[in-house]
């Protein structure tokens, strides 16, 4: 069975850049910033590395350059936005006062490049930060499956995928067809594959094409010795990120709670301190919902962050396990794009001016 796809477009990225640039050039974002009541923002980072971006790089949004990280810090301080720890942000949400707007830096997953390329920048500017770790990435029971299928599609001109309904032939012979195939595999692994089967299934897909998922983990993720090293940095707060980086909303309640509790327990065993803060893997609506926000409270976390875009408002004091974040996106590594995001205007417009998104 051969699958055909429609043409994939970069129109959304192009349009978003135009809108953000327009807000920046007109000063609309800066005017709005003076009018809204947000307390601050929590920023999401993944990879920070100097490597050039390959021509086919569907995960490019997850990677920024160290130089851009420094620019983000300088920009925020230039706007009189205070960069604080997650513990301090929690206290400000619980007890809002007339203080400067704040920003919190959070790094997901525990990539080695956080230690090698982000931490030196953060140390230079004395910026506090949080790193959310999933022990499964360290132990090899979870996979960077989205990077595995990127490597697979980049290397091949064609693929065969075994599904229950038969063999699917996937065309990777051009750049546009590679993007379509990547999207197909992305949907297959996050929608058609049961969450608990994802680890096994991605390895079955990649192994015939000599994509070594275990080697990818060893190359990209911190070891326990490196986790212990970064945890000793007085600027660092260690957070939990489940045991195996599961999309919790796709699990039964007991399974989801077990992922949260076991991940935190292993970090406590290895580091001697139980994490008080949590990040939902993937963090979008289909991966973390109101049920999971309640489970995070039951697991004992003081805060939990999503990737739902938004600013932090005083009203979030009643929803500390459903906090929004702003992604520092590798496709928007320009201050004319980043600056409007920090005003809160783009996310308020996309949310039809609602402050909370906690359902």
Image (cartoon, helix red, strand yellow):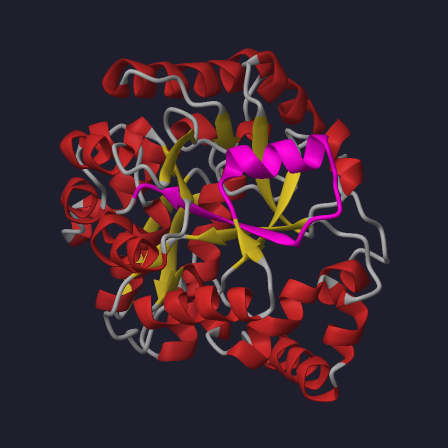
The quadrant of the image that shows the C terminus is top right
> With respect to residue 138, does 337 lie above or below?
below
The quadrant of the image that shows the N terminus is bottom left
Q: Residue at x 39, y 65 (%)?
A: 69
Quarter holding residue 347: bottom right
Quarter holding residue 313: top right
- Depth check, front residue: 44 or 230: 230
Q: Which residues are magenta?
A: 84-110
Q: Residue at x 41, y 59 (%)?
A: 62
Q: Residue at x 45, y 15 (%)?
A: 261
> With respect to residue 252, does 16 lie above or below?
below
> With respect to residue 231, does 29 lie above or below?
below
- Tell whether position 34 is magenta: no
Q: Give the left or right position of residue 101, taking residue 222 as reference.
A: right
- Depth check, front residue: 290 or 75: 75
Numbered-mark total: 0
* Residue at the front extreme of this rendering: 98
């Amino acid at each position: 069975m051969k699958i055909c796809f429609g043409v994939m477009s970069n129109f959304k990225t192009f349009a978003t850049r135009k809108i953000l640039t327009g807000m920046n050039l007109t000063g609309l974002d800066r005017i709005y910033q003076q009018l809204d009541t947000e307390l601050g923002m929590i920023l999401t980072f993944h990879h920070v590395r100097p490597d050039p971006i390959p021509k086919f790089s569907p995960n490019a949004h997850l990677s920024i350059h160290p130089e851009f990280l420094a620019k983000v810090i300088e920009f925020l301080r230039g706007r009189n936005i205070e960069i604080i720890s997650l513990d301090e942000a929690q206290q400000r949400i619980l007890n809002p006062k007339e203080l400067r707007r704040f920003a919190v830096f959070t790094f997901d997953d525990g990539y080695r490049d956080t230690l090698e390329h982000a931490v030196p920048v953060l140390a230079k500017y004395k910026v506090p930060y949080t790193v959310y770790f999933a022990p499964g990435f360290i132990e090899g029971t979870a996979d960077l499956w989205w990077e595995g299928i990127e490597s697979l599609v980049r290397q091949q001109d064609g693929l065969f995928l075994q599904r229950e309904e038969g063999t699917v032939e996937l065309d990777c012979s051009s750049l546009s067809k590679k993007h379509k195939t990547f999207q197909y595999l992305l949907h297959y692994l996050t929608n058609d594959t049961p969450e608990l089967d994802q680890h096994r299934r991605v390895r079955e897909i990649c192994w015939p094409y000599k994509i070594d998922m275990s080697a990818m983990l060893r190359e990209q993720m911190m070891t326990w010795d490196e986790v212990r090293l970064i945890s000793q940095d007085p600027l660092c707060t260690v957070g939990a990120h489940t045991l195996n980086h599961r999309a919790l909303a796709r699990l039964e309640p007991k399974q989801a709670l077990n992922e949260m509790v076991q991940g935190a327990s292993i970090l406590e065993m290895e580091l001697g301190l139980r994490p008080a803060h949590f990040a939902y893997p993937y963090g979008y609506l289909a991966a973390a919902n109101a049920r999971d926000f309640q489970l995070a409270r039951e697991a004992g976390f003081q805060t939990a962050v999503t990737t739902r875009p938004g600013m932090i408002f005083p009203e979030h004091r009643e929803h500390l396990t459903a906090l929004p974040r702003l992604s520092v996106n590798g496709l928007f590594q320009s201050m004319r794009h980043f600056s409007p995001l920090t005003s809160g205007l783009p996310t308020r417009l996309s949310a039809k001016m609602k402050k909370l998104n906690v359902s």
